[in-house]
Image (cartoon, helix red, strand yellow):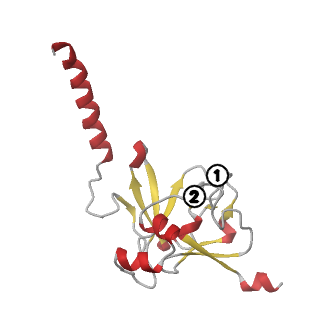
Amino acid sequence: MKSYRPLLWLVGVILFCVILWSLNMSSHPRGTAIRIGHPKAGRLERSEAEWKAELPADAFRVSRQSGTERAFSGASWDTKDAGTYRCVCCGQTLFDSTTKFDSGTGWPSFWAPADEDAVSLFGDRSLFATRVEVTCSRCDGHLGHVFEDGPKPTGLRYCMNSAAMTFVPDTESATK
């Protein structure tokens, strides 16, 4: 048994580090708040049962359970039409097509939100990686993550899930 003590000690240290890594020292249910947006229409609170009854299964899994759709599978990953992208849960405008770009990732990517107050940002330490989660500031719906490898002028890449958003075409562009 003595020959296993160093191995058990190492496993204990690794387990302790993993637990510390995954802990969030915040009282917010999503984790460590980086920036909380302030929706113009106020907050929208619903129970998970109400969201589940209202949303399609894939939209519920992605937006309410922090899921991710497969790359190149979402409805709007390659949409090039003019318009706005709104939260599938509450309808809040999140992104404008003028900030969308082809990131090559298979998910809709934007270099800025339509309004800084439309989204909230949280530290995400899941899957042994440190990322920044993006949520709708009105209903806390999970949208995706933001990375610092985007184009100018912001240098950011808001990598969103199509299932968490609804695309609304610009009527002026559609009539031209």
Question: Which residue matches tag 1?
Answer: 105
Q: Residue furthest left?
A: 2
x 50%, y 57%: residue: 145
Q: CA separation, marks 2 and 1? A: 8 Å
- Is 93 drawn above or below residue 100 in the view shown? below
For mark 1, does the 10 Å Cα neighbourhood hold few (<14), some (14 to 19), or many (20 or more) residues? Answer: few
Q: Secondary structure at mark 1?
A: loop
Dot 2 or dot 1: first in sequence order is 1
Q: Amino acid at mark 1?
A: Thr
Q: Quadrant of the N terminus?
A: top left
Q: Quadrant of the C terminus?
A: bottom right
Q: Nearer the viewer, residue 54 or 173?
A: 54
Q: Which mark is residue 168?
A: none
Q: Position of residue 9 (x, y in %)?
A: 21, 24
Question: Which residue matches tag 2?
Answer: 159
Q: Position of residue 108 (x, y in %)?
A: 63, 62
Number of callouts in the render? 2
> Horizontal placement of 6 versus 32: left or right?
left
Q: Amino acid at mark 2?
A: Cys
Q: Position of residue 39 (x, y in %)?
A: 44, 79
Q: Residue furthest right?
A: 176
Whether pointer 2 and pointer 1 mark residues with C-beta atoms closer than 8 Å, the reply is: yes
Q: Position of residue 129 (x, y in %)?
A: 43, 44
> For residue 41, which quarter of the picture?
bottom left
x 42%, y 68%: residue: 64
x 34%, y 57%: residue: 32
x 25%, y 21%: residue: 7
